Image (cartoon, rainbow, N blue to C red):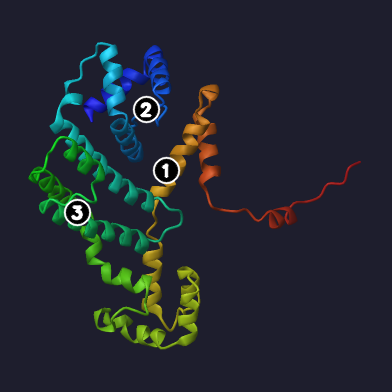
């Protein structure tokens, strides 16, 4: 990443270089009109920057040569293959990241996204170990360009590290997986795998056609509102626990975007107190009952 970031900054942070580079891309009728900035804070920017950099690798090399700036990595086949592999695996991670940022997702949905990606990593590793690069199109193209036909086991090792990292980060979820499964779909869970305190309630639910029809409508939380809290006490407790596990990813991204929009150059004197108020109003989900508030106000007749 250091080579990519330094090269992008050399081109974009200097006004003359940036204008000349954009003009150069326009002159050669390049598919892309510019590079993208790399932002350390946001993971998605890393993937987009890497992919755009790879797509413009030849144009960047020509432009840097004209500027007499030597970047030997851009001529190194091994480095270019590593970059292509990094672009591919980062793109896969970006797909996961985007899915995790969806609004109003329940913890069971988020865990499903993560579990799915872990399974994909296992498939990727198996394919790389056998020399199959179909899920790594950028690397496959670069390897064919430089006739790199031998299996690169260093990439397999990197996937092993990534797989282990995911297992370590999400190991706590395995301890409550059965409870998440009950929460996400009580109709498909095996009763034998459920806690004894919930088993009889789950049997009743699975044999209640009205509840099954309600569940099939698709609104999980609305379905659980139809469950009698006294009859299914332990099941309701599990529902409340699972529903209270909030996804903060979307909230953080939303807040970050609002912060950037409100701290624009033309509002650089925006006080922290005012910014805090704007962020609170923009991100809160609470909707005031205006009619009730108005009804409590005392009318004052004009003189």
Residue contact at pointers 2 and 1, CB within 8 angstroms? no
Label 3, residues with CA under 10 Å away: few <14, some 14-19, many ≥20: some
Residue contact at pointers 3 and 1, CB within 8 angstroms? no
Question: Residue 253 has which mark?
Answer: 1
Residue at mark 3: 124
Give percent across and percent down for residue 254.
46, 43
Of residues 35 and 301, which is closer to you in this image? 35
- Work out whether 123 lies above or below 60: below
- Work out whether 86 lies above or below 180: above
Split into 4 quadrants, where in the image is the C terminus? top right
Split into 4 quadrants, where in the image is the N terminus? top left
Mark 3–mark 2 Cα distance, whole angstroms, equals 29 Å
- Work out whether 135 lies above or below 227: above
Residue at mark 2: 35
Numbered disc 1: secondary structure: helix
Give percent across and percent down for residue 224.
46, 74
- Work out whether 251 lies above or below 66: below
Mark 2–mark 1 Cα distance, whole angstroms, equals 23 Å
> Residue at point 18% right, 57% down?
122
Name the quadrant containing residue 194: bottom left
Of residues 237 and 181, which is closer to you in this image? 181
Numbered disc 3: secondary structure: helix
Mark 3–mark 1 Cα distance, whole angstroms, equals 29 Å
> Residue at point 44% right, 87% down?
208
> Residue at point 52% right, 32% down?
262
Numbered disc 2: secondary structure: loop
Frontmost of labels 2 and 1 is: 2
């Amino acid at each position: 990443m250091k080579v990519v970031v330094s090269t992008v900054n050399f081109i974009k942070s200097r006004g003359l270089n940036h204008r000349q580079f954009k003009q150069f891309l326009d002159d050669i009728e390049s598919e892309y009109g510019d590079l993208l900035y790399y932002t350390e804070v946001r993971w998605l920017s890393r993937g987009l920057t890497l992919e755009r950099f790879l797509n413009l690798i030849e144009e960047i090399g020509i432009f840097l040569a004209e500027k007499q700036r030597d970047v030997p990595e851009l001529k190194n086949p091994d480095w270019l293959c590593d970059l292509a592999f990094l672009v591919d695996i980062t793109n896969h991670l970006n797909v996961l990241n985007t899915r995790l940022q969806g609004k109003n997702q329940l913890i069971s949905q988020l865990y499903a996204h993560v579990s799915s990606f872990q399974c994909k990593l296992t498939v990727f590793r198996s394919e790389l170990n056998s020399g199959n690069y179909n899920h790594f199109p950028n690397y496959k193209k670069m390897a064919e360009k430089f006739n790199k036909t031998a299996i690169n086991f260093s990439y397999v090792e990197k996937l092993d590290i990534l797989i282990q990292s995911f297992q370590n980060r999400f190991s706590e979820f395995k301890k409550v997986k059965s409870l998440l499964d009950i929460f996400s779909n009580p109709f498909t869970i095996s009763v034998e795998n459920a806690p004894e305190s919930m088993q009889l309630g789950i049997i009743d639910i699975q044999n209640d056609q009205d509840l099954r029809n309600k569940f099939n409508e698709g609104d999980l939380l609305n379905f659980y509102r139809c469950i009698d809290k006294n009859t299914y006490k332990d099941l309701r407790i599990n529902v409340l626990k699972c529903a209270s596990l909030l996804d903060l990813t979307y909230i953080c991204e939303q807040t970050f975007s609002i912060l950037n929009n409100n701290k624009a150059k033309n509002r650089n004197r925006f006080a922290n107190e005012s910014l805090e108020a704007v962020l609170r109003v923009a991100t809160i989900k609470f909707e005031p009952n205006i009619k009730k508030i108005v009804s409590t106000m005392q009318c004052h007749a004009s003189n």
